[in-house]
Amino acid sequence: MNVDNVRLSRQDRLFYLANDFFLLVIALVIIYPLVYVISASFSSPNAVVSGKVWLFPVDVSVAGYKAVFSNGSIMTGYANTLFYTVVGTAFSVVLTIAAAYPLARRDFKPRNVIMMIFAFTMFFGGGIIPTYILVKNLGILDTRLALILPQAMSVFNVIIARTYFQSTPSELLEAAQIDGCSDMRYLLSVLLPLSKPIIAVLALFYSVSIWNSYFDALMYINSESLWPLTLVLRDILVANSINMSMMQNVDIDTLSAKIGLSELLKYSLIIVSSAPLLIIYPFIQRYFVKGVMIGAIKG
């Protein structure tokens, strides 16, 4: 029977109507701030400071983006964040796969004990001070490694990858072993080419976490030359410390326009800092959905 031909009762129609209205309201609540930030970032400083921007850009201008891309500290933070994200994500994915693969092998006897030890760290940790002391004693304080090593592997992601590897047919391993394939060769030549969905999921999880992280940098990094973009944003958005040198390459005459540009700069920074992840996500979305479903349900 075709579901589309089923006649709905009055109560069902009212329920679907109310449900659609509720979801529409929720969508507007979520989407409007995003639209406002985008519109404000492309508006003129005077329009922003006077509150004329409501939905669409007013007196379209790219003064905010000129100020962002002409400032050295912002671009340095952007480059640092790209480095931390790319290198940290690659390192974390390699570590996660290296941990998840043996834990997924049924012939690896201590896998349950090791998995319990891993899971223990999800609920109990040393805390901020012991972690800081450890980073300091390792000699990586105020270095790039301080933002890569301490959070290099997530147990949650190990569990997802382990579950995914367990869902692969055991006949593949048996056939590879009969052909004389080593464990490393099987992992690199057979399993990983079949694991693109879970690799994409791990890369997305780690990259988003590293890109948005600022607390580790706040604790471990003192040199401004090593600051990620999130710390630069924190100073501008929270501490409100906008250097007037950011505005020297923009033609602004009046004081009100300069104040407007300082507000405009905040909106432009939000867009610039969010753009890379928004651009990348559509290309890995199909892997993301498939990988999460397989890694979460099977096993």
Image: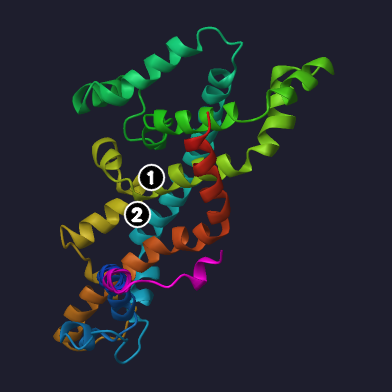
Res 209 label: 1
Image quarter of residue 101: top right
Q: Are marks 2 and 1 in contact (CB under 8 Å)?
A: no
What is the CA distance from the residue labelled 2 to the residue labelled 1? 13 Å
Magenta stretch bounds: 1-18
In the shown orientation, is residue 270 left or right of residue 262? right
- 4 and 53: which is toward the camera: 4
Q: Nearer the viewer, mark 2 or mark 1?
A: 1
- Which quarter of the rendered picture does the N terminus lie within? bottom right
Q: Is residue 211 above or below residue 173?
A: below
Q: Any magenta on residue 6?
A: yes
Q: Where is mark 2, residue-wise?
A: 229
Q: Main secondary structure of the magenta part?
A: helix
Label 1: element kind:
helix
Q: Is residue 168 above or below residue 247?
A: above
Q: Residues within 10 Å of mark 1 (few under 14, many from 20)?
A: some
Q: Amino acid at mark 2?
A: Leu
Q: Residue at x 55, y 31 (%)?
A: 94
Image quarter of residue 131: top left
Q: Residue at x 17, y 83 (%)?
A: 49
